[in-house]
Image: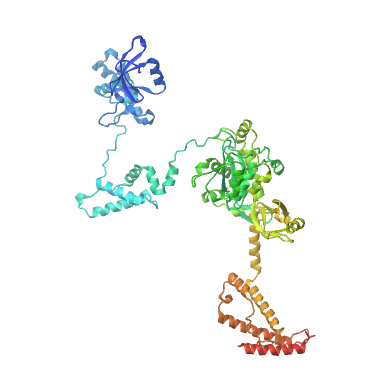
Amino acid sequence: MYQLRANQNIRIDGTKFTCVRKLAGNKGWSLMNAETFEPKVMAVDEFLDGYSNARIDFLTDADVQPSDGQFNPMVTDISVIPEEQMREARRRKVYVVACQMLGLERTAKRMKEIIRETADKLGEQKAPHISTVYDWIGLFERAEGDIRALLSRTYKRGPRAKQLTNDTFVIINNMTKSKYLRMPRLSAEKLHRLIVAEVNQVNDERALDRQIDVPSLSTVKRYLGSLDPYEVRVARHGRKKADTWYRVYKKGVVTDRILERVEVDHTLLDIIVKCHHTGVILGRPTLTVAIDHRSRAVLGIYLGFEVPSSMSVAHCLHHAFSPKTYVKSAYPKIKNEWFCYGLPESLVFDNGLDFLSAAITSICETLNIDIHYMPGGQPHYKGVVERFFRTIQEALIHRLDGTTFSNTKDRGEYNSDANACITIEDLLAKIHKWIIDIYHQDVHSTINDTPANAWKISAEELPPPSLAKSQEHLKPLLGGFDQKAISNSGVIVNSLKYNDPEILQTLLRQPGAPKRWQLRFNPSNLGAIEILDPVTLTYYTIPAVDYEYASRQTLYRHNIHKRKNAARKAKVTDIRELCRSERELEEDIELSRQKAKGGKRVKGIEGVNVTRYEKIATQQVGSDDYMLSNSSKCQMDQENTSADRLSSARVRAKKRPNSDTAVELAPPTIAHDNTEVSQLLEDTSSEFNKEFSY
């Protein structure tokens, strides 16, 4: 259709040129810049190369946009033209081609006959006028046979309906800014009602000949659709949401080898877990994962109930750095190997406090591992691990009994608590099975390979993965640190007693032994602790006294048991009565002490120390009856209680030594002052001396 010839317009890198003449010997063309009129010589090879690389294209008269701003179909991509418009263009082309085939016989009479015959073939009763067909032929030939030249000029024309008045538009614009583009968000329907109310109010104040039109709901929606969608979302959802919604995802970080970049993060699993031994519901566990960016293989995991913390990150890193030789013995049903391990070149964390542990930082510095912290609230910076969390939730967790699903809509009427039966050990086994035998063996859409095979291929091209000098160098990652006093009977940590008499005696007999000793424990297994010898800087392992219980407990699970036991004790213990009994016992002891001094004057119970019981009663009961700060009430209680004790003592004194039954109790005597109390004490003392020999 197109070829270089004289007066042919072409475009080179966006600049228009006109072909002047062909050079002698077919060496090229002489061109002229249509804007600057500067000459240019272009070889044939240069033209063909530019055309192949889409730097040069041909221009026609129709490529120039009309000066009146009307729609030009020749600059429209044919793929976006509606099918209805294309059918009309093809219909017109049938008439054009039929008339072009006349050649030299293209007379008016002959053309009318051909147009009529063509209309009959197309089944049209009314054929187009000959002048219309002439116009179609001219457009088609000037466009070098491009069918877009035959498109109807009504394509993309604007609406012909009545336009809004300026006053109505102002109201719509103002109401949109003040009511719609803000938070809390207002729907388009509610906005339309407010606009109608505003228009009606304006019309009520105007004469009938100055009324303005009431816009329809579709008019309001079209106006809202014409606004900048990004600015609308910023106003209604915030800039952060808008940036996330309209963010263009690029290729992202590119890695060339395994262990070059490892991403670490937590997620709360959508499942409720029970304790294997007690049946107590432990809650929803948190899964911490370290995943290799290059192969998408899981490098390490940690499953626990603790709030995401540096401890869970440390355990995950310890698992990631170490070989997984335990898999075959611990989970014999797993078919494949978990051969992913090693020290990474860099670790990628988010900016949470759980990743800012001094122990993690120091270990990474010791092992020459770079740490990168991502901006807060930007999970796409760790897209690999975030996508893994979604995969494991949907592919595994939501299939298990006791799952909570990802939201209440998906959960429906499913009772997660009632159906919970999975233990933490069982869940950990299922996660191992899913990662090793399913996730690692399935093709990952991003890398077009399985994570296991991608790891193997990259590992074959590199030296073996680096390891720490020994497992001892990784132990600081696992430790919960504390300082405790120790004795020959042992040391209490987390309400559990630990003892090894031989080791503890050796430590205690050291010259200058500290009062409090540095120790560390593994929160995932409380079976033993390690105490630091300050002289040799060596840790000694001390087992738990109740090793059978402690070795099966994590710190989280142990704390749950402690809370359960405390609640059970509170149910069977009456703290009010316990405090009262303690106070009575203290008063009896004080009374006996006073009598032993030879009948000295008793000053109420001023010597009784009730501070401890006052504190207990105040904290546990919270009743004014046990708030001993009221001096007058306290004094009355002291007098009444003293009189009761003395009256009871008098009755007991009248009992015979060998009698098995008590005499009838007399009504208690109430002492109103210290003199009467002293007299009662002297009388009672005399009677005791007569009846009993001490």
Residue 253 x/y as whole percent? 51, 37
Q: Is residue 182 above or below residue 456?
A: below
Where residue 223 sits, quadrant-wise, is top left
Q: As drawn, which residue projects farthest toward the front?
A: 511
Q: Is residue 562 above or below residue 639?
A: above
Residue 134 x/y as whole percent? 26, 21
State left or right for residue 343 relative to residue 158: right
Residue 250 x/y as whole percent? 47, 36
Q: Is residue 338 above or below residue 358?
A: above
Please say whether residue 566 is visible from this viewpoint: yes
State left or right for residue 502 relative to residue 468: right
Which of the two residues, 318 or 380, is positioned nearer the viewer here? 318
Q: Is residue 536 above or below residue 149?
A: below
Please say whether residue 123 is visible from this viewpoint: no
State left or right for residue 693 relative to residue 252: right
> At 67% from the left edge and 77% from the top edge, which residue is drawn?
586
The C terminus - image quarter: bottom right
Residue 663 x/y as whole percent? 73, 87
Which of the two residues, 472 or 243, is positioned nearer the viewer here? 472
The N terminus - image quarter: top left
